[in-house]
């Protein structure tokens, strides 16, 4: 009865640790990238976190809540406001952005908890995003309206973060930590509870799991991750504008989740990378950029409804989502 | 009022239809109590009323001496009365192992920050749970299916997984609604064996609805016979086999 399976060492090709090679290889990028390319790579990391956070609510929890641009904008504006008016350092403002993003997530979860679901949840959360944009425009004394709010000089632990390379290493560290933390959560009882709620809320409750707590937790964690992405976005652009957080931005976020793979953390990373990099590449064909962008989304969703990650899952089981540890 | 679960004078009337009338019986701790009766006898209604899905029109239900009639299904489940459903409630996007692990959820001792940072303690709690889930599956000879998606299993295998998942929550009282229906003969025998062992070794008390009379006779400690919403007999399998009224009503002999 009591035969414990001994821990077998798996070869690297079947071991999840192989994914650590991705940030290690990425760390070499500054050695051959010019400033423009480096800026794009930095933006890619911003959007990887945007997608990771959004996917938790859309893919893992299965709730049609589109408050993501609100979390993103709140994170970005909070960073600029805390640094400008409260004299926060960037590190502290980043924590502030994560907390305010989490609080916005808590607010968004209230709608889902009160039984507002599906299309109703979708429209209410979209309205929340638009309402926040209205606030950024009209709270002029604080946000400087459509002129945008500039960030003071960004330093991290006393070092200037003005160069793209400096930003890159700080962003890489944040991205790795947030993705790893999210992965830890998903591979535990937390990840399973969230997935179980998506499948069947009543059965989940019958197993003694407090579904309300996990719905709140998902929204708060999602809001914090996207709030952090907002802080990175602010540092990257060095000036925060209301237009960055409009309805088109919602579509971009949603496309990243769907193209990467709803409910897959690896899919989120892929979606964020691909849909940030490709539009930049298509800039060399002026007038055709949106066409290419739209065509890619349609093609992927037609032929790979579970996203690009499903293609990789066929090649190696490493790309299949696992919700446990052994 | 000596049993783990006591029903006294329970009636359920649905707008004139008398689904259950004045039913009283007890299910004892550590025993398998079987409910039998022809279709429409009120067995499933009785399950629904015990698990809180249907409210009784009259009567009282006590679990561990505490009145549980009028509670919601979730509250009844919290008290320790857990049930399986006729047409499963497995999580279709998970593997068999992940389903069992979800049943073990409340027993995994870890907090949010430990899980987030992947501390050794949180990791070990997860690994121990996975090992326990595999052992529970082995109880039912289902360990070979652990890493399969539940969608790829047959209906009978899915029911096995659902029972293992419910057992994983360590319920004091487990309500099983026709656990053997649709299973192959060897699996049915295996199922009954497991049910007996659960009651004997794991100390889980079981209330069971089952149509297969041979399984009920072999596997249960006590049998309650329902017909047209009323209890017509109660006793050990040997006594039920001899009961003339039961033979007429249920087995169709005259």
Image (cartoon, coloured by chain):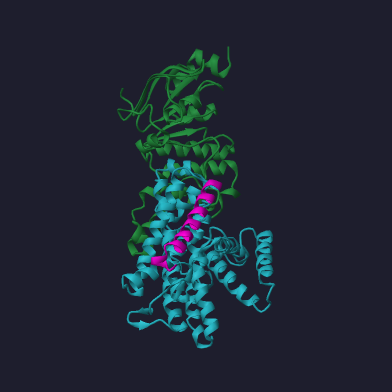
> Where's residue B75, x and y in %?
37, 35
> Where's residue A191, x and y in %?
45, 56
Query: Camera-side residue: B201 or A292?
Result: A292
> Where's residue A324, x and y in %?
45, 58
| Residue B224 position (above or below residue A51) | above
Residue A142 included in the magenta stretch of the image: yes
| Residue A31 position (above or below residue A305) | below
Q: Single out the residue that lies furthest toward the top.
A: B254
Instruction: Check the rendered structure and report the hue given to chain A.
Output: cyan
Query: Camera-side residue: B76 or A56?
Result: A56
Residue B198 included in the magenta stretch of the image: no
Residue B187 picture quarter: top right
Task: Give the residues drawn in magenta, as a range.
Answer: A119-144
Instruction: Tell me the green chain.
Output: B
The kind of secondary structure the magenta stretch mainly shows is helix
Left or right, B26 with respect to A55, comes to left
Q: Is residue A247 visible?
A: yes
Residue A285 picture quarter: bottom right
Left or right, A114 with respect to A269, comes to left
Q: What's the residue at 59%, 39% (across, down)?
A: B184
Q: What's the residue at 52%, 44% (across, down)?
A: B90
Query: Camera-side residue: A45 or B141?
Result: A45
Give the quarter of the figure containing the C terminus of chain A.
Answer: bottom left
> Where's residue A147, x and y in %?
47, 71
| Residue A165 position (above or below residue B207) | below
Query: Camera-side residue: B92 or B230?
Result: B92
| Residue A225 position (above or below residue A283) | above
Q: What's the residue at 41%, 59% (across, down)?
A: A221
Q: Can residue A225 be seen in this view?
A: no
Left or right, B160 with respect to A174, comes to right
């Amino acid at each position: 009865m009591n035969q414990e399976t001994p821990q077998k060492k798996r070869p690297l090709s079947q071991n999840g640790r192989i994914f650590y090679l991705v940030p290690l290889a990425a760390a070499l990028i500054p050695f051959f990238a010019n400033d423009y390319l480096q800026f794009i790579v930095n933006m890619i990391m911003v959007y990887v976190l945007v997608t990771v956070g959004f996917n938790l609510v859309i893919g893992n929890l299965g709730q049609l809540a589109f408050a993501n641009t609100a979390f993103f904008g709140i994170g970005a504006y909070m960073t600029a406001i805390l640094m400008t008016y409260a004299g926060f350092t960037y590190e502290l403002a980043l924590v502030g952005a994560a907390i305010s993003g989490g609080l916005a997530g808590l607010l968004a979860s209230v709608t889902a908890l009160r039984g507002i679901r599906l299309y109703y949840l979708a429209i209410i959360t979209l309205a929340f995003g638009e309402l926040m944009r209205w606030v950024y425009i009209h709270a002029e004394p604080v946000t400087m309206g459509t002129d945008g709010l500039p960030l003071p000089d960004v330093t991290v632990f006393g070092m200037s973060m003005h160069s793209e390379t400096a930003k890159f290493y700080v962003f890489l560290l944040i991205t790795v930590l947030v993705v790893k933390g999210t992965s830890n959560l998903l591979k535990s009882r937390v990840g399973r509870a969230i997935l179980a709620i998506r499948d069947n809320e009543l059965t989940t409750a019958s197993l003694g799991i407090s579904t309300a707590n996990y719905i709140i937790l998902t929204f708060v964690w999602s809001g914090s991750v996207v709030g952090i992405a907002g802080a990175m976005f602010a540092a990257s652009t060095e000036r925060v504008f209301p237009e960055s957080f409009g309805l088109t931005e919602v579509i971009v976020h949603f496309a990243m989740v769907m193209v990467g793979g709803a409910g897959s953390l690896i899919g989120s990373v892929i979606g964020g990378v691909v849909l940030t990099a490709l539009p930049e590449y298509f800039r060399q064909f002026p007038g055709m950029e949106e066409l290419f962008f739209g065509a890619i989304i349609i093609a992927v969703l037609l032929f790979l409804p579970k996203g690009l990650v499903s293609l990789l899952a066929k090649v190696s089981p490493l790309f299949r989502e696992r919700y446990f540890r052994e | 009022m000596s049993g783990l679960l006591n029903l006294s004078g329970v009636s359920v009337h649905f707008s004139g239809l008398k689904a259950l009338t004045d039913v009283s019986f007890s299910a004892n701790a550590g025993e398998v109590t079987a409910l039998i009766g022809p279709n429409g006898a009120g067995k499933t209604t009785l399950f629904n009323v015990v698990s809180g899905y249907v409210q009784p029109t009259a009567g009282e239900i006590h679990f561990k001496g505490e009145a549980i009639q009028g509670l919601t299904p979730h509250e009844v489940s919290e008290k320790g009365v857990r049930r399986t459903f006729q047409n499963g409630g497995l999580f279709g996007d998970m593997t068999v192992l992940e389903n069992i692990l979800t049943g073990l959820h409340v027993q995994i001792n870890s907090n949010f920050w430990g899980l987030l940072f992947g501390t050794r303690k949180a990791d070990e709690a997860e690994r121990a749970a996975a090992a326990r889930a595999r052992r529970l599956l082995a109880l039912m000879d289902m360990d070979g299916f652990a890493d399969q998606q539940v969608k790829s299993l047959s209906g009978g295998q899915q029911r096995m997984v659902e029972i293992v998942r419910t057992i994983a929550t360590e319920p004091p009282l487990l309500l099983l609604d026709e656990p053997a229906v649709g299973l192959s003969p060897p699996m049915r025998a295996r199922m009954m064996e497991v049910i007996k062992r659960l009651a004997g070794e794991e100390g889980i008390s079981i209330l069971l609805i089952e149509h297969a009379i041979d399984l009920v006779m072999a596997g249960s400690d006590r049998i309650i016979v329902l017909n047209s919403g009323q209890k017509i007999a109660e006793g050990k399998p040997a006594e039920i086999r001899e009961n003339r009224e039961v033979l007429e009503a249920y087995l169709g002999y005259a």
